[in-house]
Amino acid sequence: MKSLAELAAIKEKMQNKVIMREGTGDIRVVVGMATCGIAAGARPVLNAFVEGVNEAGLSDKVTVTQTGCIGICQFEPVVEVFEAGKEKTTYVKMTAEKAKEVIEKHLKGGTPISEYTISNV
């Protein structure tokens, strides 16, 4: 880092990620990041949600966060979506590609993708 402008650019880039994880949106996306989840590939899933929600302009509506063990290790990576007034949706065996689809169809479109949920395993 050689200038104040460079520092400001780094701050702005990282602030978007922090805001995504600490926001107060109507929809909360929780990615299981315990050892089992990380070993199964949860880190790229979390990154895909953080970046995808930001790129889709949903940061005022959707909060992306992480948690420890959700308790269904055999189905990792696990993502839970909480929406006010609705039952939570639990997505299992997630990938970064599936996360992009969930952002488009569920978070933007309002329709959960049933074939990725725990009820279809």
Image: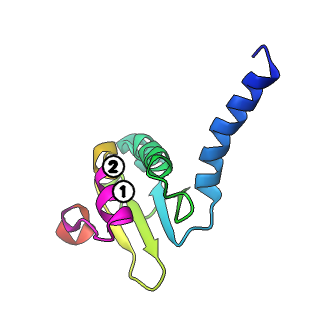
Question: In the shown orientation, is residue 19 left or right of residue 89?
Answer: right
Give residue 100's mark: 2
Separation of disc 2 and disc 1 at Cα? Answer: 5 Å
Q: Amino acid at mark 2?
A: Lys
Measuring from the top left, give residue 54's x and y in whole percent. 50, 49
State which region is magenta. Answer: 100-115
Closer to us: 72 or 1? 1
Crowding at label 1, few (<14), some or many (≥20) Cα neighbours within 10 Å? many
Give the residue pinned by disc 1.
Answer: 103
Give residue 14's mark: none
Question: What residue do we see at 33% from left, 49% from top?
Answer: 100
Measuring from the top left, give residue 47's x and y in whole percent. 47, 43
Residue 55 seen from this side = yes
- Tag 2's secondary structure? helix
Question: What residue do we see at 62% from left, 45% from top?
Answer: 16
Image quarter of the C terminus: bottom left
Q: Quick check: marks 2 and 1 in contact, CB under 8 Å?
A: yes
Question: In the shown orientation, is residue 10 left or right of residue 30?
Answer: right
Image quarter of the N terminus: top right
Question: What residue do we see at 48% from left, 61% from top?
Answer: 30
- Tag 1's secondary structure? helix
